[in-house]
Amino acid sequence: MMKVRDIMSTNVETCSNQDSFQQVASKMQSMNIGAVPVVENGQVVGMVTDRDLVTRGLTQSTQGNVSQVMSNNVVTISPDASLQEASALMAQNQVRRLPVVENGQLVGMLALGDLAVQQQSDESAGDALSNISVPSQLH
């Protein structure tokens, strides 16, 4: 059975909660990513997405830092979890990306797309996407 560690990305771009909107947006653009974990001393303290920057950040001010717009309640997963556990966690929490944490430290990132390209998890990725895409009030 495949584990999260088998398919997760390990070169994860991170930011600090003091990084400016501009710094994080530039990272997202140069790396072609839509979410960046906010890390302090190797530990995930938040998550900021391109949507957070636009809906919470730029609508209020073009000057600001990540701590103003990041999500604080970050759902994480162990690298030893199964792909089925990962897709169930994504579906349950309506998230498309999970920071992978081992011994309290960020070691990788798992995206819904990573699950989708794994043949054995195609069905669970489809289930996760179906549940992620359902408006939260229907859960």
Image (spheres, helix red, strand yellow):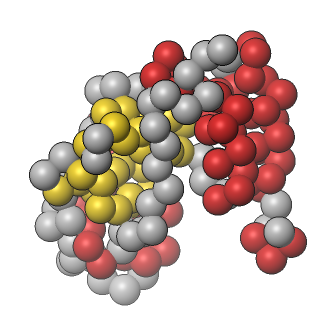
Residue 78's x, y, as percent? 46, 37
Q: Is residue 21 visible?
A: yes
Q: Is residue 48 above or below residue 72?
A: above
Q: Residue at x 21, y 71 (%)?
A: 65
Quarter holding the C terminus is bottom right
- Residue 74 image position (x, y, % from top left): 44, 60
Q: Nearer the viewer, residue 121 or 66?
A: 121
Quarter of the image where the N terminus is located: top right
Residue 57: x and y in percent read: 37, 76
In the figure, is residue 139 to the left or right of 101?
A: right
The image shows residue 105, relative to residue 9, as above or below, that is: below
Q: Residue at x 50, y 56 (%)?
A: 75
Q: Residue at x 55, y 32 (%)?
A: 81
Q: Foreground residue, 87 or 61? A: 87
Residue 59 in which image quadrant = bottom left
Asked whether residue 31 is in view, the answer is: no
